[in-house]
Image (spheres, grey):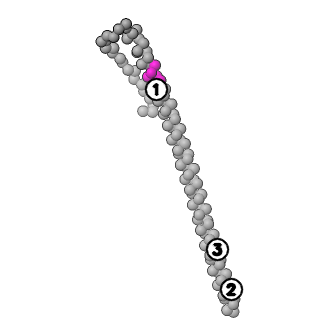
Amino acid sequence: FEKLEKWTVGHVRALEERMSDVERWLVDKEKEKEDEQVSEKETHDSAKEIQEIREELSEMQSRVGELGREMAKIATAPANLSSGPTRQSAEIIAPQLTSSTM
């Protein structure tokens, strides 16, 4: 009877250890899954932010280009093209630009 009791106790302990190992493995797997989901969400959010920055940069480039064209028009206007330096003060009216992003 003692041998059976020792064998049973030994096997029960071994099963408890094994169950403990399996539980730790399951917890680790769940953490990995959660980390992957968080990582994927962060990646998606980052990609969205980068796309927004690209769109804003594109708009800024077009505005700078438009500003350059306006400056070229003003600089090459017949009233501003004189043969010598003069103290003319040209009144410049800046066009008002409206944007939906401001």
Q: Quadrant of residue 72?
A: top left
Crowding at mark 1 (Cα within 10 Å: few <14, some 14-19, many 20+): few
User: What residue did someone put label 3 on?
Assistant: 18
Crowding at mark 3 (Cα within 10 Å: few <14, some 14-19, many 20+): few
Marks 2 and 1 sit apart, C-alpha to C-alpha, by 84 Å
- What residue appears at the point 55 percent right and 42 percent down from the top-left corner? 47
Q: Quadrant of residue 90?
A: top left
- What residue appears at the point 55 percent right and 49 percent down from the top-left corner? 41
Label 2 secondary element: helix
2 or 3: tag closer to the N-terminus: 2
User: What residue did someone put label 1 on?
Assistant: 63
Which residue is at the far left? 87
Q: Amino acid at mark 2?
A: Trp
2 or 1: tag closer to the N-terminus: 2
Crowding at mark 2 (Cα within 10 Å: few <14, some 14-19, many 20+): few
Position of residue 98 measured from the top left corner of the image (x, y, whole percent): 42, 27
**The one of 97 and 18 positioned closer to us in this rendering:** 18
Chief secondary structure of the magenta span? helix
Which segment is the magenta one?
A: 63-69
Marks 2 and 3 sit apart, C-alpha to C-alpha, by 16 Å
Position of residue 6 measured from the top left corner of the image (x, y, whole percent): 66, 87
Label 3 secondary element: helix
User: What residue did someone put label 2 on?
Assistant: 7
Position of residue 38 measured from the top left corner of the image (x, y, whole percent): 55, 53
**The one of 82 and 17 positioned closer to us in this rendering:** 82
